[in-house]
Amino acid sequence: MANFVDLAEVKARAEAKAAATNTEVATTTTVTQDNFEATLGLSMKVPVIVLIGTARSEESEALKHNLSTLAAQANRTWLFAYVDADTTPQIAQAFGITGLPTVIALADGRPLANFEGGQPLEALQQWTVAVVNAVAGKLPGLGEEKPEDPRLTEAAALVDAGEFEAAIQAYDAILAKEPANKDAKTARDNAKLVMRLATAAGDPISEAAADPTDVEKQLSAADAEIAVGKVQEAFDRLIQLLPNETVKKRLLELYSVFEPGDPRVKAARTKMAMKLF
């Protein structure tokens, strides 16, 4: 990354801010002028994966959603930061990028790896694991007060290894004992989505368009739309098929892989309620 800004000038200030950072660190952050140095400071503790993107790009929106989802499942072994090139162009320029979207992994305040353009969810998952492994033992970590649940850690390792069915069984075992465990439910539903995407073939969206009454094809098309950032389109596609119970169950699973306050989920839940009642 020859064009990447030399961060040495702000590294000392970033380290000072990192030392004072509250242990309750968000897994996803939107970078602004006010928190830019603090974000760099967090990379002294764990890798910070930065997406410089724009809402004008479907690839960028898909990356934003998928990286945010993966960060939420990573037990704070890495954090996700989003830079909006439209609203904060000066920050985007500071990273010396040549195209949008661009993803950069920061460690110790400096770039570790990067790529341009979109990537499927499974590839992103493998890339983030490689980033974490590259700095294993070299960064102190966030020192979170809340201990990691070893059961979730083991299940996440199965997902990373591509053993999706085993991971889902592990999450289901947790939920059988703890039905209210939101972390396990979110992780399980995310693992189901990743497994379906990893095994998908052909062009699900075109196939669904050719056969609009086939429920399975519509379910596959919705997965494909979510993978490329067309979240609202995916929800609307499935809501049209209600009150089909299989579709209802899939919608609830898909909602859970997003943040609860996501406006797209709120809108979809409202449409779903109107369709059902």
Image (cartoon, rainbow, N blue to C red):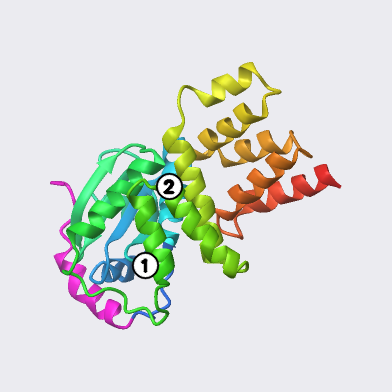
**Magenta: predominant secondary structure element?**
helix
Please tell me whether mark 1 sits on a helix, a strand or a loop: loop
User: Which span is picked out in magenta?
Assistant: 1-20
Instruction: Say which residue label 2 marks.
Output: 164
Q: Residue furthest top?
A: 210
Task: Tell me residue 130's x, y (percent).
Answer: 24, 52
Distance from Cα at disc 2 to Cα at disc 1: 21 Å
Instruction: Please name whichever residue, 221 or 152, is drawn nearer the observer in this view of the structure.
Output: 152
For mark 2, give the secondary structure: helix
- The amino acid type of the residue labelled 1 equals Arg
User: Which quadrant of the structure image shows residue 149?
Assistant: bottom left
Q: Is residue 240 magenta?
A: no
Of label 2 and label 1, which has the lower sequence position?
1
* Pointer 1 residue: 76
Query: In front: 53, or 71?
Result: 71
Kind of residue at disc 2: Phe
Seen from the viewer's position, the closer of residues 244 and 258 is 244
Tell me: 186 left or right of 161. right
Identity of the residue drawn at 55% across and 54% down: 258
Q: Quadrant of residue 230?
A: top right
Which of labels 2 and 1 is toward the front? 2
